[in-house]
Each structure stands twice: as structure tokens, then as C-alpha cells.
Image (cartoon, rainbow, N blue to C red):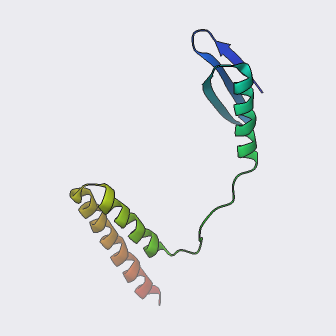
Amino acid sequence: MSSYFVKGKGWRYDFTLKGKRYTNAWYRTKKEAKQAEAKHREDLERPLPAEGPTDTDFFTLVEARLDHVKNHHSERHYTEIRTCDLRIRSLLFSASLKYH
């Protein structure tokens, strides 16, 4: 655990876990920085279990993505994504016919 003070900015923490560096800043006190570091370490060591179904098929995920793009992006972007989706579907369909 390494917490240190940077003049004019405040406290920050910095640590390495499994060869990867983690850092975050700026805290008003050393105690806040140490508590945040401890929580970050705990979150990394005990990841949350995956939520939601994991048996979703590819096409359901694609449809969900298309719905999101249609609602949150421009019409042009949606059209480009939809075109790519149709190409992928045709390739996958032709590949499945080839191997059956």
C-alpha cells in the first residue's frame, strides 16, 4: 500500500496487483486515500459474479445492440450498423448451410 501527498493537489494511492498498476487521486486526507485503496484492492480480489443470463445467442445480442444504436445514435450510424449486421448474418447463414 502506497499513499503519498502531492503539494497543491492532495493525497493519492498507487499499488501493483498481479503485475498491473492501479492508481487513483485526489483525496483530502491520507486516511481517505488508504480507505479508497483498500476498497479498490478488495473489489479486484473479489470480483462480483456476472449478472444476467449467459446463454443469450448471438443474434439476440445483435438485435439488442441495434435497438440501442437506433435509440441513441444518428440514423446514418444505425443504417451502417444494420448493413454490417445483414452482411454478417448472410455470411453465418451461408457458412451454416455449407457445413450441414
| Left or right: 42 in relation to 90 | right
| Extreme residue in the right direction | 1
- Along the line of sight, which residue is nearer the eye, 92 or 28? 28
Q: Is residue 96 visible?
A: yes
| Extreme residue in the top direction | 7
- Residue shown at 60%/70% (left/top)? 54
Q: Is residue 21 above or below residue 49?
A: above
- Along the line of sight, which residue is nearer the eye, 7 or 28? 28
- Residue shown at 59%/67% (left/top)? 52
| Extreme residue in the bottom direction | 100
Q: How many marks?
A: 0
- Along the line of sight, which residue is nearer the eye, 4 or 81? 4
x then y, percent, for residue 16:
72, 33
Displayed quadrant of residue 12: top right
Displayed quadrant of residue 86: bottom left
| Left or right: 88 in relation to 29 | left
| Extreme residue in the left direction | 76
x then y, percent, for residue 68:
37, 61
Q: Quadrant of the N terminus?
A: top right
Displayed quadrant of residue 96: bottom left
x then y, percent, for residue 3:
72, 21
x then y, percent, for residue 38:
76, 35
Q: Is residue 63 above or below residue 98?
A: above
Q: Is residue 34 above or below residue 65?
A: above
Q: Is residue 18 visible?
A: no
| Left or right: 31 in relation to 93 | right
